[in-house]
Image: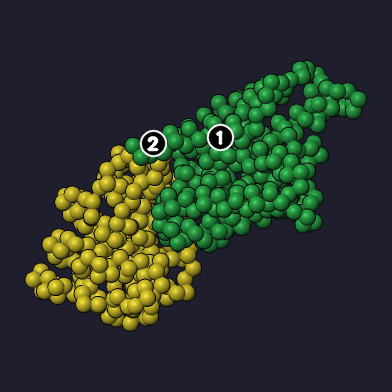
Chain colours: A green, B yellow
Amino acid sequence: MMFCLLCFLPIAMYLHLMAGQIEISFDSFFDSFWNYDAKNTAHVLVREFRIPRLFMAIFAGAGLSLSGMLMQTLFKNPLAGPYVLGINSGASLLIALSLMTSVQFFQSNFGLIGTALIGAFAAGLLMMAVAQRLKSQISLLLVGLMFGSFTSAIVSILESFAGAESLKSYTMWSMGSLQQVEFGQLGFIFLIFSVGIAASFLLVKPLNMLVIGEKSAVLLGLPIKSIRMFILMLTALFAGLITAFCGPIAFVGIAIPNLTRILFQTSNHRYLIIGNCFIGAIFLLLTDAFIQVLEGHISIPLNAITSIIGAPFIVFLLMRKLR
Amino acid sequence: MIQLKELSIGYQREILHAENMILEVGNVYALVGRNGIGKSTFIQTVAGLQKKMAGEITLNGQSISGMNTKEIAETISLVDTRFEGVEYLKVKDYLALGRAPYTDLFGRLDPADWQIIQDVACDLSIEHLLEKFSNEISDGERQLCAVGRAFVQETPVILLDEPTAFLDYINRKKLLELLLRLAREKSKCIVLSSHDLELCLDQSIPLLLAAQGKISLHVSLSKEEIIQAMS
């Protein structure tokens, strides 16, 4: 399986790079790195649009899948994920505040990331507190959905007060897109993701212990409070960062971890972490490549495609579990 | 060795008070009592999962209140009434989790750890289940695996909360005999809650009788006396 994914990732990257409306040769692609010419349209296109979009698809796919996997293991619930549990909603709410109000510290690019991280982490803490008081997994998901509805309602109120320009920028952001990242920001995002993925590997043992439940994990020596906080921070880091740069992307965080478990047939997080990174990245690369192919005719938001694929998959999972 | 001193357990009000007692290594103790009397709460409290209301629990001479999570994991293992199995978790990986208190940061197992797992699987006759997924075996087999995980943890104290609930008579008897042998040969102190009164009496297991708000230790009570005390 791992070998297949290793082979398939470069293919998905190639398809994504070549999927745009303007044809780019391989030479222009490499020249845009080593012999960049700002006057060459192909070079500019590759460097300013195709490359950031390509890497953002990889980072967002891998990051959302990882945050979903972390949530599913922590809550011992295969239907958990940053979107369902309101982690994205927390980030979205604060971003809506930043884009549609005049609060100044929200304005810069890094302010926006910080805002999303705070929102995601606060929502994660809220869900954690609720989870401690609820025994039913379904109740927790319902609370997550209620929280999502609540934040949407606040955002709607903000929208009705917002000016045309800020309303437009929020609406564009909320559709979800991989095109909002600039070449210069990739290094920073790569650094954060590398740290996040390395930190995930430090959690392999605790996550493997958590699959048999918190109580049993504690009796095996797991310091549950600090591990819970570590997992929440990591989830908020991935979900918050991606939400800040790409807008809310639905269903990747819930569907891909389940798909990975099915394909790898394991609950060992040493393999699940790698699997989620690869499958999440490949999924978003192919989805975005499809959107690029259609871009000449219609403009489809990324969120719509991930929902169209993700929602039936979740229904399939539910039916499989309830059968 | 477990030493209990004026132990009071419960949630907001006391539900059970344990007499001062010492549970020695090399022995199996059966905690018996009616449904809802607080047997599980007692086991959870001794395991450190539930706060005691008053009194003291000492494990091998060390108060449980002063022990950290790792020290408790190296001293006590607990088998719950039911292990429901986990999707895509193989039995061998489930048993391997018992080595978690002793493995490195990444949970890697060395050949000695795998040998312990193999030996326990052999003792419990569950070698044929090792490669199977834990959610695809029967309730009884899963319960044996849960007991196996506690054995793999190699702690001096083993607590079992109704471990025989999903086992047939042959497996119940076999498990009890195995626990007795393990306690004797490996110097373990084993406490199990059970409704298998006859089986415990047959094996002459000392009883921790939970009745009328108290837990007391008995070594020679007849079935009739126990039933009378319970009712």
Report the front residue among B167 and A114: A114
* Residue B13, position as x, y percentages in the image: 34, 77
Q: In this view, does B35 lie above or below B97?
A: below
Could you tell me residue A36's position as x and y percent?
Answer: 87, 27
Q: Residue flagged by tag 1: what amino acid is it?
A: Ser
The chain letter for the residue carrying disc 1 is: A
> Residue A152 vs residue B64: left or right?
right
Total numbered labels:
2
Front residue of B50 and A161: A161
User: Residue shown at 19%/62% (left/top)?
Assistant: B195
Quarter of image, res A172: top right
* Classed neighbour count for the residue bearing mark 1: other residues with Cα under 10 Å, few (<14), some (14–19), many (≥20): some
Looking at the image, residue A253 lies above or below residue A121: above
Quadrant of the rendered structure where residue B89 is? top left
For disc 2, the chain is A
Q: Which residue sits at x=66%, y=38%? A: A176
Amino acid type at circle 2 is Met
Q: What element carries label 2?
A: helix
**Looking at the rendered structure, which numbered label has been put on residue A307?**
1
Q: Where is residue B218 in the image (x, y as percent from the top left)?
A: 19, 75
Say which mark, if any, is on residue A35. Answer: none
Looking at this view, name the residue that lies furthest to the left. Answer: B224
Is residue B120 in sight in this rendering? no
Q: Is label 2 on the same chain as label 1?
A: yes
For the C terminus of chain B, give its image quadrant. bottom left
Q: Nearer the viewer, residue A250 or B213?
A: A250
> How far is mark 2 from mark 1, CA to CA?
18 Å
Left-right relation of A256 to A9:
left
